[in-house]
Amino acid sequence: MKPERETCSTSYFLPSRGFFFMFGLPLLTVAILGAVGIFWILYTAVFMFVSRDWAAEEEQ
């Protein structure tokens, strides 16, 4: 009798499905969430750069 295969919920690779997982999510989902986060950081940085002199313009 073969021992049952042990599975771990924190496994990053599940060969039965053929997808890489991170935090229990498919790689595509992780990539999309990561892209949204990176976009948000870049958007905020650009906004901060563009609006850095707005207070000086209001005083004039």
Image (cartoon, rainbow, N blue to C red):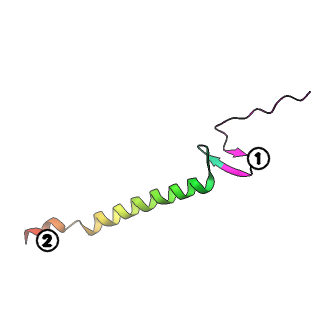
Relative to 3, say whether 16 is above or below: below
Q: Quadrant of the N terminus?
A: top right
Crowd band around label 1 with a 10 angstrom C-alpha radius: few (<14), some (14–19), many (20+): few
Left/right of residue 42 with respect to residue 3 in the rendered view: left
Look at 11% across and 69% down and name the residue there: 58
Residue 23 found in image quarter: top right
Tell me where the magenta segment starts and ends, as one range. 1-20
How many marks overall?
A: 2
Q: Mark 2 or 1 closer to N-term?
A: 1
Q: Which residue is mark 1?
A: 15
Nearest to the eye among marks 2 and 1: give it.
1
Marks 2/1 in contact by CB < 8 Å: the verdict is: no
Tell me what residue is drawn at x 13 percent, y 71 percent.
57
Q: Please, what secondary structure does the residue beneath circle 1 have?
A: loop
Which image quarter: residue 43?
A: bottom left
Query: Would you say residue 2 sits in the magenta stretch?
Result: yes
**Amino acid at the residue labelled 2:** Glu
Prevalent SS, magenta region: loop
- Residue 32 rendering spot, x and y as whole percentages: 54, 58
Residue 8 picture location, percent across and down: 69, 35
Which residue is disc 2 drawn over? 57
Label 2 crowd bin: few (<14), some (14–19), many (20+), radius 10 Å: few
Residue 28 in the image: state x and y as whole percent. 61, 57
Amino acid at dot 1? Pro
Distance between the Cα atoms at labels 2 and 1? 59 Å
In the rendered image, residue 27, in percent from the top left (x then y), is placed at 62, 53
In this rendering, is residue 54 above or below 15?
below
Horizontal side of residue 18 vs 59, given as left or right: right
Q: Secondary structure at mark 2?
A: helix
The part of the image, by quadrant, that contains residue 46 is bottom left
Circle on res. 38: none
- Residue sitting at 82 percent across and 30 percent down? 4
